[in-house]
Amino acid sequence: MKHDILLIDAKDNVGVALADIAKGGRAGISAGGEVEAADDIPRSHKIALKDIRAGEPVIKYGEEIGRAREDIPRGGWVHVHNLEIGEG
């Protein structure tokens, strides 16, 4: 399967869409496996690679980049509407 999702670090719970992914579409992950998109995922945006519960950290680059504002299902679009980013 073509890899449409980049996993940057093995600790990450989100990947980066390398192409637009339509809701319901299956996309390959660079580290192996695949995920079904729960939402339309725009190119270069984050996609949840596992269920992320409200309040849990969102991990990208192996580091916490924020916390989920609400439950985000595996395959869900992770963006400003559901990601709380703390003040530096």
Image (tube, rainbow, N blue to C red):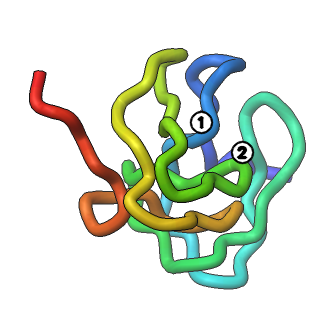
Q: Which residue is mark 2?
A: 3
In the picture, measured across the screen, residue 23 lies left or right of residue 74, that is left
Label 1: how many residues lie within 10 Å, few (<14), some (14-19) or many (20+)?
A: some
Q: Quadrant of the C terminus?
A: top left
The label number, if any, that marks residue 6 in the structure image: 1
Query: Disc number at residue 87?
Result: none
Which is nearer the eye, 77 or 31?
77
Front residue (pair 7, 66): 66
Taking the spot 50% from the left edge, 36% from the top edge, the residue there is: 57
Label 2 amino acid? Answer: His
The image quadrant of residue 67 is top left
As measured in the structure, the alpha-carbon distance from the residue carrying label 2 to the one carrying label 1 is 7 Å
* Tags 2 and 1 touching, CB below 8 Å: yes
Residue type pointed to by label 1: Leu
The picture places residue 41, in percent across and down from the top left corner, at 48, 68
Q: Specify whether 37 is left or right of 18.
A: right
On the image, the x and y values in percent for residue 80 come to 25, 59
Picture residue at 55% right of the left edge, 79% below the top: 39
Q: Residue furthest left?
A: 87
